[in-house]
Image (cartoon, grey):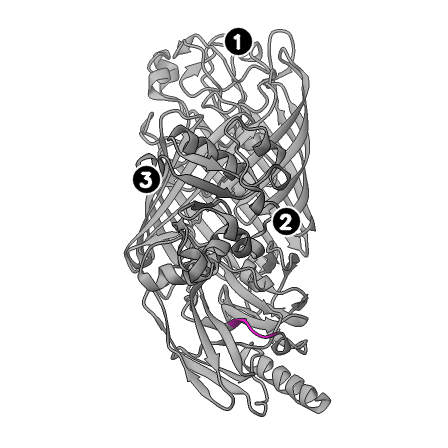
Amino acid sequence: MVLSLALAALVLALSSAREGAVAAQEPRAASGTIRGRVELRRAPAGGERPAVAELGMPGPREAVDRRRSVVYLETAPQPAFETPPPGRAVLDQRNETFVPPVLAITAGSTVDFPNSDRVYHNVFSLSKPRRFDLGRYPRGRSRSVVFDRPGVVRVFCEIHSHMSAYILVFAHRFFSITDAEGRYRLEAVPPGSYTLALWNDGAVRARRELRVEPDAVVELDLAVE
Amino acid sequence: MSRLLQGRKVLALGTGVTVLGVLRILHADGAEAFALPPSDVDPLVRRCRWYRPGPDAVQGVTPQTLAGALDAMPQGTVLLPCSDAWVEAVGSLPPSVAARFSSAVPLPGAVDTLINKELLAVALDRLGLPGPLTVAPITALSLAAIPVRGGDPLAFFGGRLRLGGEVSGTIAPEDLGFFNYNDYETSTLRLFRIDLMAEARLLPSVSLLFDGRIDNLSEPRVYALYLRARPWPSRDFDLQAGLVPPVFGSFARRRYALDNPLPSLPLAYQYLTTIREDALPENAEELVAQRGRGWLVRYPIGNTAAGPGRPLVNAERWDAGVQARIGVRPFSLALAVTQGTLSHPEFEDENGGKQLSARLAWTPLPGFVAGVSAASGDFVADSARAALPDGASAGEYRQQALGLDLEWSAGHLILRGEAVFSRWRLPALDATRIEDPLDALGLFAEARYKLWPGVYVASRVERLTMAELATSFGPRGWDAPVTRVEIGAGWSASRHVLLKASWQHNWRDGGRVRENDLVAAQVLLWY
């Protein structure tokens, strides 16, 4: 068990450094898999505040990718909620955009906020699970925040009101951020009955009840209406 | 209900106030309604005039023991559960017992669905029926996952039309010295403002921008309305035409309540001096006599009605004209030709003259901006000029200004400072003639420091001085100098709600009220 946790921690750390998510897990014996695809049927909201007081047009900025969803288990038997190992993730500030716009981590994880822009940024959050304000810092500098409590943390830049991102902090490890094609995959899910939740762009968009059998794969496609 | 239950025995199952309501309704409708024995119900129910205790057989009955207790109840009694637990109990009665009584409760599975709001939400979703957003608080994430939208502007037509806005309410005691009044004759510290901003992208490189305001629920007014174009997308060069943002200085473009750490405006951008473009003093004595009364001055030439004077730079109005901005890192240069002047921006030209203004900004490193500004424009309105003698009416009566603005920020600290020097020339008519230019210098320094996330303290120190003018009783400042110190704090209750409070002290070397203290509070909602 100890070896399994250590291996899981290593996998989590590696995956967070690569993808900014820490959902991957070593499959367990007799555990199941939930996978599927998320279809976006609603136009993502977005845009900026009208820049009426500016003397010129805003510079080119990367469009915020609001297509990324997070699929996670909302209910699970108690044994499924073992204390997850903390990870490390990166939320970059690039072209006046947070990259990635959605980050999913386990409680206790650390998120680094490097500034890759020529201009200052001031990352802050007033969300209850984690209030913080990193102050202004220039290109090449980075500051970090540890997220101890589960919940949704909305992150903003005080200087650029159009910049925003979400950090979803989970008390367990059963979550997955959809890839560019909308695919998700939850592995090593203990057998049992669950509620699977789909989160997109600030809200839970769908819930489905399902049952995972030992060594079985549950295929479940979801849609954001 | 009355026709169904009239003359029938009804047993209201429950202990609290719901039973009370049920007994009252049934009694009024002629039913024979009973409740549980006195020892099992609230005193409130017991003391009710419609209270009738049920048979002893049901004494001490609980939802779990209901089936056994009903053995002694007469057949045909209507069971009326008055709480979720009793509904579940009646719905779960064994068929042999349930058949002897009348009740209108759902089947046990349906009861579970109705009681469990999460199941109800799922059922409504499956049936395609609309329902409230329901989040089961099973995990902390579930609670936190309640939609936290906001921060995003309202966007329509695929983002081509975007709306934003501010609603602010500022309250303070009456400003008897008129230190905070603007040329709309309202105090900036006693102001309810609704501000709507819109940006419509007409073409990929052309936008139409609008800003409309309602102050103290008066007539709406247009604050900004202009076209913005970037003719060469690869170059940092923009053109704007219409009612455009001022290029002079820094504060006038960050004067939205959200961008201002304190409720008040700096003196250089708001304080009303004794100069008017539509009314002129005949001599220096008349001008000096108005010292410290800029909120309401009266002169004999031009518009003879009393009216407010003008600030050095008016942050409450924008000017109509065209402007261009070009950026070559680390510099940015903005030039504008507009109808009015810094003191009196205009939508319609009042004197046929134009103002030329410019600002050069230098950003050598992130967090530091230095800007120098200059402006020159015809100040005196034709209506006042028409009242002048022939020799004087042909003169050039301009407002000229120079500005320096600095901003430095790092970590949780922002420091800002501005200097605005303004010079007006007015006609020299009778002795003592106003031959020297009327100079004024406004200085302010401002600091904001964040203590905790969402909480900051801020302060502004400022001074507005006027040059001396020769009069028959010696040299006098043409208006009374003013000094202000303001300290305050702000708290972001949420992303879109900002509360500010401040205390300010004003000193003035002239006027009826020479010194005052004001405490102000501001609530700001923005999106």
In this view of the protein, which residue sits in the foreground, B293 or A41? Answer: A41
Q: Identity of the amino acid at label 3?
A: Leu
Q: Which mark is residue B286?
A: 1
In this view of the protein, which residue sits in the foreground, B221 or A27? Answer: A27
In the picture of the structure, the residue carrying the numbered disc 2 is: B454
Alpha carbon separation for disc pair 1 and 2: 50 Å
In this view of the protein, which residue sits in the foreground, B55 or A125? Answer: B55
- Mark 3 nearby-residue class (10 Å; few <14, some 14–19, many ≥20): few
Q: Badges 3 and 1: C-beta atoms under 8 Å apart?
A: no
Q: Who comes first in sequence, dot 2 or dot 3?
A: 3
Look at the image and tell me whether residue A154 can be seen: no
Rendered image quadrant of residue B479: top right
> For the magenta stretch, what is the residue range?
A73-77
Q: Is residue B223 left or right of residue A188?
A: left
In the picture of the structure, the residue carrying the numbered disc 3 is: B4
Quarter the N terminus of chain B occupies: top left
Residue B185 location, x and y as percent?
Answer: 47, 20
